[in-house]
Amino acid sequence: MANERDQDLGGIRRALAVFLALACVGVLVQIFTGVPYPKVPPGPIILAVTALLVAVVRWRWMPVLGLLVALFLSVGAVASGTTLPRLAEPTRLGPFAGTWLQIVAQLAAIAAGLAGVFAASRKARTGTAAPFSGERRTGR
């Protein structure tokens, strides 16, 4: 049973890492297609490092890091004032597609991060299997 719980959380961590990596690709597409970014853009660096950490570090609370990074960068993207206009301009395909990829992947990362936090807290609190697995365990 413990192995199945670890696999459930591992699957969530893998999905979170993939979504963070896809968001990084979305930002890189924007950069390579002419969207102005700083010389050393922090977004793809933060996303890539976080994706790597979430994928490699086997700690139950690692999805919190992925969730916080996805939330932070999503709020920053909307607050910048340049993201939403790019989403409304499909004639510039590179920036449009890169922005869509980034935003959709970050929203998916937020969902996966929330699922990972929920699964980790349930595992820590009750010792039961991941949510919706149909399995229960009464002791630790």
Image (spheres, rainbow, N blue to C red):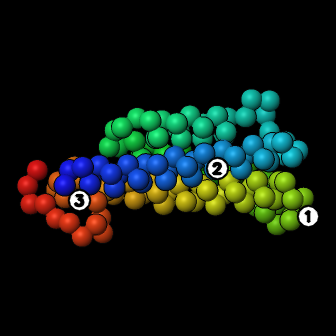
Q: Quadrant of residue 59?
A: top left
Residue matched to label 3? 129
- Local packing at callout 3 (Cα closer than 10 Å; few below 14, some 14-19, many 20+) is many
Q: Mark 1 is on which residue type? A: Thr
Q: Mark 2 is on which residue type? A: Ala
Q: Nearer the viewer, mark 3 or mark 2?
A: 3
- Local packing at callout 2 (Cα closer than 10 Å; few below 14, some 14-19, many 20+) is many
User: Image check: 6 left or right of 37?
Assistant: left
Work out how far the residue at label 3 is from the one at label 1, CA to CA, in angstroms. 48 Å
Q: Mark 3 is on which residue type? A: Ala
Most extreme residue toward the right, as rendered?
91
Q: In which quarter of the image is residue 107?
A: bottom right
User: Image check: 27 left or right of 88?
Assistant: left
Work out how far the residue at label 3 is from the one at label 2, CA to CA, in angstroms. 30 Å
Most extreme residue toward the top, as rendered?
40
Q: Name the residue at 44% across, 35% down.
A: 56
Residue matched to label 1? 91
User: Where residue 5 sits in the image (x, y, percent)?
Assistant: 26, 54
Residue matched to label 2? 23
Circle 2 — which element? helix
Taking depth in this image into account, of 108 and 68 the one nearest to the observer is 108
Specify which label sits upstream in the sequence, 3 or 2. Answer: 2
Q: Name the residue at 46% across, 49% down.
A: 14
